[in-house]
Image (cartoon, rainbow, N blue to C red):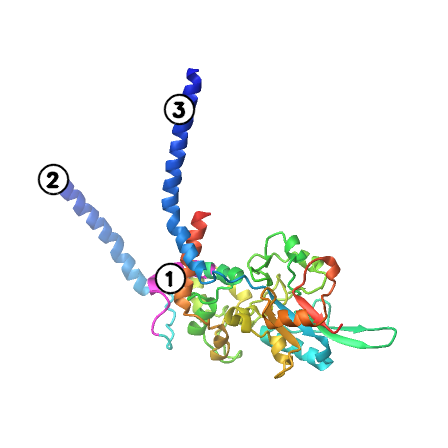
Amino acid sequence: MNGLISTLRLLLLAACLGWLLPAGAAEVESSGFGEIAIPQPAKPAAASACVEPVEIMRREHMNFLMHQRDDTVLDGERGSKYSLVGCMDCHNPSDSAETAVRYPDPQHFCADCHRYASVRIDCFECHADRGLGKSQQSQLQPLLDSDLTSLHSFRAQLEHKRVD
Amino acid sequence: MSTDLDDTELQSSRRRFMQAAGALAATVVVPGVLLYQTGQSANAGERTPRWGLLIDTNALSEADVDACVQACQREHGWHSEDGSRTDAQWIRKVRLSDKQNGHQRVLPMMCQHCAEPPCVDVCPTGASFKRADGIVLVNKHTCIGCRYCMMACPYQARSFIHEPLRDQLPVAPRGKGTVESCTLCVHRVDRDGANAVPACAEAVNRNDRKAILFGDLNDPDSEISQRLRSVGTTRLRADLGVDPGVSYQGL
């Protein structure tokens, strides 16, 4: 019986390795379909870290933004650390409209991955697709310690919704 | 009789069950309630503000009103394309003239931020809404561009965006297929509260002469409330009962 289980384990291990190894190799070279390279969007030079670790941002950025947009539009919460303006200020800053990288351009920080993942968003039909630098940024700085207030209101609203 | 007894027992056991369930629910709910109350406690004892404007037309020349419109355009990045009826107009220059003596008056006309906004009543998606502090806005994430609110507004304060736009300003997202109007410079209000100065007011207010005064109508000690008490003001089409948040002095 034990011998049977250990054989099965070995088989399973071999199968896993068989799956993993070629996949890893493919990731380095290309993704296969029409030689589209996996996007590696450049990190901003100005900031040392994003508002969350990269792994979380990759999966959750759309949820963060969706939550923040309702807080801002409906309740006037401007202090959230998740904000599309904040994204653009770091990832696509530009001083002039002529030299700015636009969303349809694959070089745009957002467009790069969205193209790869075949995601179509309409954020930038209304929102600015570039950061305007300090002049506009200063308008958006909240009066209070932003992270703490947004965290409190986020929790409060979460609990409030649960009660409802 | 026995059935009655059974019923009573059943009811009492049911009551006990409900009480227990209630207690359980309370223990589950209480942390949430407490958190919510903690979140609100910063505002405890304060009444909700209602933001409004007092516009002194005596202090506004025609050039001042033009300056208001331009300041609003700069702040929010809208502009009139060719003067057609479909142009965006967050704030308009309205000329009143007395036919008997020819006296003319020019006033800036924007969303009146009604307490009973007709645009909110007619909106089929809830996109047109009034914030807790009385500012009437369009949530463009849910606006479907039906333009009922434009029909309903007695002040013709809203515009529809017909063409695709680009290079909008971060503080004022606007896009094709949605309705827009004066936001009472909501980004400034969220930042500065009662000390906020909307862009139109900033353009025309001088050191001691506040031609456009922004403030809290619910606070009896605010400058706007005191001035509204002391001077005679007019609210446009007050007969409609929409309770506008903008008052005009000198009409």
- From the viewer's perspective, is residue B231 above or below residue A115? below
Looking at the rendered structure, the kind of residue marked 1 is: Arg
Residue B90 percent coordinates (x, y)? 65, 69
Callout 2: residue from which chain? A
Q: Nearer the viewer, mark 2 or mark 1?
A: 1
Label 2 neighbour load within 10 Å: few <14, some 14-19, many 20+: few
Residue B51 percent coordinates (x, y)? 59, 66
Q: Secondary structure at mark 3?
A: helix
Q: Secondary structure at mark 2?
A: helix
The answer to whether one can see residue B89 in this image is: no
Label 2 close to label 3 by CB (< 8 Å): no
- Residue B198 inside the magenta-drawn segment: no
Looking at the rendered structure, the kind of residue marked 2 is: Asn
Marks 3 and 1, Cα distance to the nearest angstrom? 58 Å
Left or right of A121 in this view: A56: left
Q: Residue at x 48, y 77 (%)?
A: A138
Marks 2 and 1, Cα distance to the nearest angstrom? 43 Å
Which span of residues is magenta-colored? Answer: A48-66
Looking at the rendered structure, the kind of residue marked 3 is: Glu
Residue B2 percent coordinates (x, y)? 41, 16
Residue B9 has which mark?
A: 3
The answer to whether one can see residue A21 in this image is: yes
Q: Where is mark 1, residue-wise?
A: A58
- From the viewer's perspective, is residue A16 above or below residue B64? above
Residue A2 has which mark?
A: 2
Q: Residue at x 20, y 50 (%)?
A: A14
| Quarter of the view holding residue A30 | bottom left
Q: Secondary structure at mark 1?
A: helix
Residue B113 percent coordinates (x, y)? 64, 63
Callout 3: residue from which chain? B
Label 3 close to label 1 by CB (< 8 Å): no
Closest to the observer: B110 or A63? B110
